[in-house]
Amino acid sequence: MPPSLLSIPPELHPLITTHLPYPDALALKHTHPTFYYTILSNYNASVRLKVAWLVDRKERNLPCPQKNCILKTDAAFCGSSNGEVRKIMEERRDHRDCKGGECEILRGRQCEGSKARKGGAEGLWLTDSRIAMIVLAISGLLWWLANDGILRYSINNTS
């Protein structure tokens, strides 16, 4: 099994996460209970990450909330400005900030998100990996119906 972030000493987690943009640190926080209680649990560090993320977006001429943001908690921050922060974070996650194939998240690298989007942001949800998962799920359902589901149904109804 490859080493994971959980395998390093917990004292190093805050040192690593202070270098992440706020949305990435927030996402990491929600991946495991250990991270939930350690990442962004320090109020000052959490506020610094939020402010740094907003300043960085402003400096790169990316959309920013137009109203005041509540920095007290993650939930308050994401819900502040009439949901603008949450919407901006969703657009960032879907690579809608990326223009001309250059990725705003990976800083200048080729953007896979913009390739998947092709005709616009609304088509982004149907990427190659999601299509593969849908095909796999449908294949499994069809196999179950063909082998187990219909067979069990026919046996139960004949007796």
Image (spheres, helix red, strand yellow):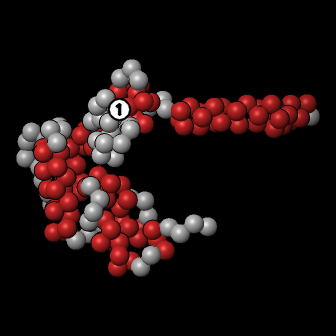
Q: Work out whether 24 lies above or below 108.
A: below
For the residue marked with disc 1, what is the amino acid? Gly
Q: Assign the N terminus to one quadrant of the image.
A: bottom right
Residue closest to the eye, 62 or 83: 62
Q: Residue at x 80, y 30 (%)?
A: 146
Q: Residue at x 33, y 39 (%)?
A: 103
Left or right: residue 137 versus residue 99 is right
User: What number of labels is visible?
Assistant: 1
Residue closest to the eye, 99 or 74: 99
Q: Residue at x 45, y 68 (%)?
A: 5
Q: Residue furthest top?
A: 119
Q: Residue furthest right?
A: 159
Residue closest to the eye, 150 or 128: 128
* Image spot of residue 101 (x, y percent): 35, 32
The answer to whether one can see residue 154 in this image is: yes
* Image spot of residue 91 (x, y percent): 29, 37
Q: Quadrant of residue 120?
A: top left
Left or right: residue 57 versus residue 95 is left
* Image spot of residue 115 (x, y percent): 42, 30
Which element is circle 1 on? loop
The answer to whether one can see residue 37 in this image is: no
Q: Assign the C terminus to one quadrant of the image.
A: top right
Residue occupied by mark 1 = 101
Q: Work out whether 41 lies above or below 133.
A: below
Q: Work out whether 25 lies above or below 149.
A: below
Left or right: residue 144 versus residue 158 is left
- For disc 1, the neighbor class at 10 Å (few under 14, some 14 to 19, many from 20) is some
Q: Residue at x 12, y 45 (%)?
A: 59
* Image spot of residue 97 (x, y percent): 27, 36
